[in-house]
Amino acid sequence: MVKTLKGSSARNAFVLLACASLLSACGGGGDGGSGGTDDPILGIVAGSPGGSGIFGSYFVLNWAAQEQEAENRRNHSKYTSQTGNWNIAGATRSTNAILSSGVEYAHAAGLTGLGQIVAVIDAGFRKGHEALAGAILSSSPADAVDGHGTSVAAIIAGESSSFIGIAPGAQLYLQDFASTYQQMANATTWALNNGAVAQNNSWGPTDGSNNELLATTSGLNAFIGQGATPYLNALSAYAAQGVVIFAVSNEDSLTQIDLMAGLPGVAGYQGLEDGWLAVGNGFPVFNSSGKITNVYMMSSSCLQAVNWCLVANGQWEHVPTADSNTSYDYNLGSSFAAPQVAGAMALLAEAFPLLDEHDLRIRLLASADNSYFSLSGVNEGTLTSVELAPGYFHQFSSVYGAGFLDIAAALMPIGAPLVTTMTGKEIDTSTAWLKTGSAMGDAVQRSLEGVDVKVTDALAADFALSGDKLFAQSQPASLAAKALPRAISTDLTALRLAAITNLTDIFGAQEGRTVDLADPTGAVSATLLVPDAGSDNVGIALMRSLQGEGFRFNIGLKVARDDGTFIGFGDAGQGGATTKMASIQMGVSQDIAANGFVSLNTEFGLADLGKPDGFSSVSNARFNAVGVELGSRSVFTGGDRLAFGVSLPMAVTSGSAALDLPTFGTRAAGDSAFDHLDVDLSPNSRQIDMSVSYMMPLGDDKELMLKALHAENYGNIAGVTDNAVVAAFKWSF
């Protein structure tokens, strides 16, 4: 039988030339040398299978936590050794095969492919190469020694002092394809029986004239005529469980995909698609922001294999070869793009232990970078939209298939990450589920900090999200934003002359407009809270005043409904609950000395917070507020007023809730169940407001007010401060 390798030794050329041998593709290499051990230079700490300490410990919405470690790797010689300049499309361009895949982020997070097996069928291997030390689990006893297979194996799972592969913690099963098809079938069956996550093939069959067989009925029949039936049967059995990976032809002028890359499109073998990937070789061009702006195809396009094809960078500068156990050289071709995808399968299998190989295959397709499709200068061919999971679509190109390999993206949530409550409600966690009122501060978030809630993305991958990320705090308006409108709407003359003032607005913490009503004597007053557009806030407060010589006492009742932005669980787009609240307000003022006065205001009440979906119970919340003001009149001029105030704005003082959510706890990695999570609703640190104000008349119907405010623990969150200075001038006419 005659086979072709999917690589080329031609350098500095846009069209790759076939290798001068019976093998029409030349390929890369791998490094399995680590065998899953820690990397003392780069700090890789290999996790246990199942992602313990990696994706079982935090939710990866972005790679901010790993960015510095990823940058360290980008600057390390094991990675920079792959940087080289190539003459592509008439211009000298720089590229780096391993970094173009985004694998440094996986390595920075500790993923190495530990516990995973990748089978490799290739031309032969130098098994004693330093980069493969400890990586070879098993192999055919009579394998030839060949640089092509050595490079391919090393790209998958190799590591040495100067080289690192995609999954350096994975192990390899090696099979020389110079053997019979029956022996290759036996190797494929071994991969099936031993749970190999992928089988890499950087070669393709040819006819007697060394022409590659194409994915047609005649091409299939020619392959069967070479005695390949046992191998085809073994591939079919393996693909039902694992993922078969074939490099596409390096002939970039093909209009029909080659046989093995396109086999799922041939009559009788369409059922193979769920376990099949074809990989092309593309030279990516990145802009200064790290975004792909174009990919120059250095191999056949995906063509008829479009729905199971993607592209990786097959231009390697420094890969193990067969010349010696320490030899390295450049290699390029689709042969060395395919093993990157095989290594990526091993990384994903380690990160997502509950997904099967077919699920992982879909992740690679769904996460492939297709953002450069339709950009200026890109020839993407025909574009189609493919539904990879219910409701999740990805655009495919007849040139690039799903797009360019992006391992970092494959490890992040794909589509909307959802948490499912015990009642079956699905909560989209890409934004906060609910907002907690500012009267709670960060109490809810603090109670759930460090509790790993299980969320599932559109492709059924589980991630652990710290429970506090489900909630956002409703931020109160700034002191300045509150104080200036109050000053403008207040009767400054009445305020300056009043014997008693409310230190906190009756509805000041809630959104909406207030309307004040009073009888002519001022003994009875009412304040209405009128909702703004889109707000559910509404309320009424009634106040009765009693006064004597130098003394005044106020007592009132307030009832209100709050949309959760002040107290409760507001609607952050996913169904919050309105709050019903009632409180008693009291204030007393007493003149002291000649022109001095002291005022004390208090409010205490009870709130029914409702019960949003996901909560098994929510208690009523108690809240209160208190403020004191000390001042004097006629300090600098007749009729002026100077006052100092300290207050504790309204805050929850007691209350609790419980949620039933799926969590990652002390169970085995990947396991989860609904847990009963208790939440304290009272903040640890209360807001403290301090103020100094000065008011004076400037003549008939003219008033001036100057006020400075400072808040500690603003929004009832420890350490947050705010300041404001307000100057108001009012002229009545």
Image (cartoon, rainbow, N blue to C red):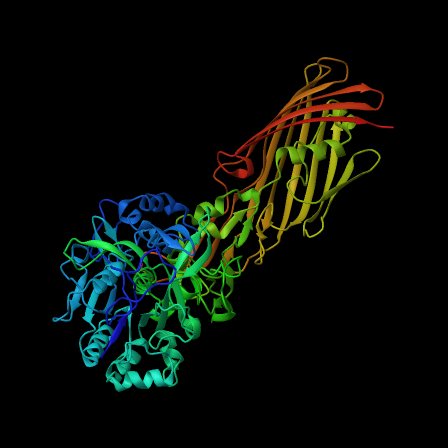
Q: Which quadrant is home to the N terminus?
A: bottom left
- Quick one: which residue is furthest to the left in this view? 141
The x, y position of residue 477, in whole percent, is 62, 39
Residue found 51% across the figure and 47% down from its top: 655
Q: Is residue 609 left or right of residue 462?
A: right
Residue found 68% across the figure and 39% down from its top: 506
Q: Is residue 603 left or right of residue 473?
A: right
Q: Is residue 502 above or below residue 304?
A: above
- Quick one: which residue is furthest to the top in this view? 636
Q: Quadrant of residue 409?
A: bottom left
Q: Which of 145/45 is in front?
A: 145
The x, y position of residue 113, in whole percent, is 27, 59
- Quick one: which residue is furthest to the right in this view? 733
Q: Is residue 303 above or below residue 499?
A: below
Q: Is residue 652 visible?
A: yes
The x, y position of residue 706, in whole percent, is 69, 23
Number of numbered discs present?
0
Q: Is residue 268 left or right of residue 159?
A: right
Q: Quadrant of residue 315?
A: bottom left
Q: Which quadrant is home to the C terminus?
A: top right
The x, y position of residue 22, in whole percent, is 24, 72
Q: Is residue 43 visible?
A: no
Q: Is residue 183 left or right of residue 493?
A: left
Q: Is residue 107 above or below residue 345?
A: above
Residue found 53% across the figure and 61% down from its top: 374
Q: Quadrant of residue 245?
A: bottom left
